[in-house]
Amino acid sequence: MTSRFQLVICNLCLALCVGCAASSDAPELGEVSGVVTLDGQSVAQAEVAFTPEQGRPSFATTDENGKYNLRYSAQTDGAVVGTHSVSISTERDQTGGEGDQPLVPAQEERIPKKYNAESELTAQVSAGENTINFELKTE
């Protein structure tokens, strides 16, 4: 009986190991962080979007110092390795207000269209850590 139990446990462990070692369908990602400034001033609460040529985009919101850290998904930091078009925006519609949710006030766009609606920004993401700063100008 003991050897049968050991065989079952051994097979279960082997099956779990094989399942864990299976290849993932997730693309190769690089960690991306940086700072967004406009005319030398940090831009707080800006939405930063990196859209790759193929695959899912990554997003971040800048903190009070203009710093951002891209998220590929709710559980995963980073962005797909490769070339991305980049959009940076501060515009936000008023949201929330349901139940105990506070209203998030609307915010006007402070960033020129050439960096969001008609973005000319691009970035190259490599495997590993990437620091990509955006020094935007109003002119």
Image (spheres, grey):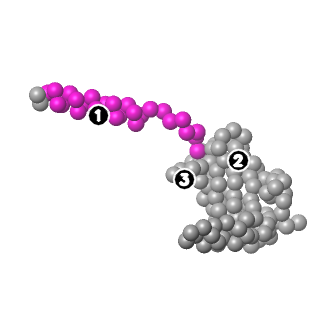
Q: Residue furthest left?
A: 1
**Could you say which disc has been placed on residue 51 in the image?**
2
The percent coordinates of residue 135 (x first, y second) are: 76, 63
Label 1 CA crowd tier, 10 Å (few <14, some 14–19, many 20+):
few
The percent coordinates of residue 52 (x first, y second) are: 70, 44
Q: Residue furthest right?
A: 139
Viewer-nearest of discs 1 and 3: 3
Amino acid type at image mark 2 = Thr
Q: CA distance from mark 2 to mark 1?
A: 40 Å
Badge 3 marks a residue whose secondary structure is loop
**Could you say which disc has been placed on residue 74 in the image?**
3
Are dots 2 and 3 in contact, CB under 8 Å? no
| Residue at position x 69%, y 38% in the image | 54
The percent coordinates of residue 59 (x first, y second) are: 65, 54
Query: Which mark sits nearer the N-terminus, 2 or 1?
Result: 1
Amino acid type at image mark 1 = Cys
| Residue at position x 70%, y 72% in the image | 105
Quadrant in the picture for the C terminus? bottom right
Q: Residue furthest front?
A: 99
Is residue 82 in sight in this rendering?
yes
Badge 2 marks a residue whose secondary structure is strand
**Could you say which disc has been placed on residue 64 in the image?**
none
Badge 1 marks a residue whose secondary structure is helix
Amino acid type at image mark 3 = Ala
Q: Residue 83 vs residue 8: left or right?
A: right
Label 3 CA crowd tier, 10 Å (few <14, some 14–19, many 20+):
few
Quadrant position of residue 8: top left
Magenta stretch, residue numbers: 3-29
Task: Give yes or no for residue 19 being in the magenta stretch.
Answer: yes
Residue picked out by circle 1: 13
Is residue 33 in sight in this rendering?
no
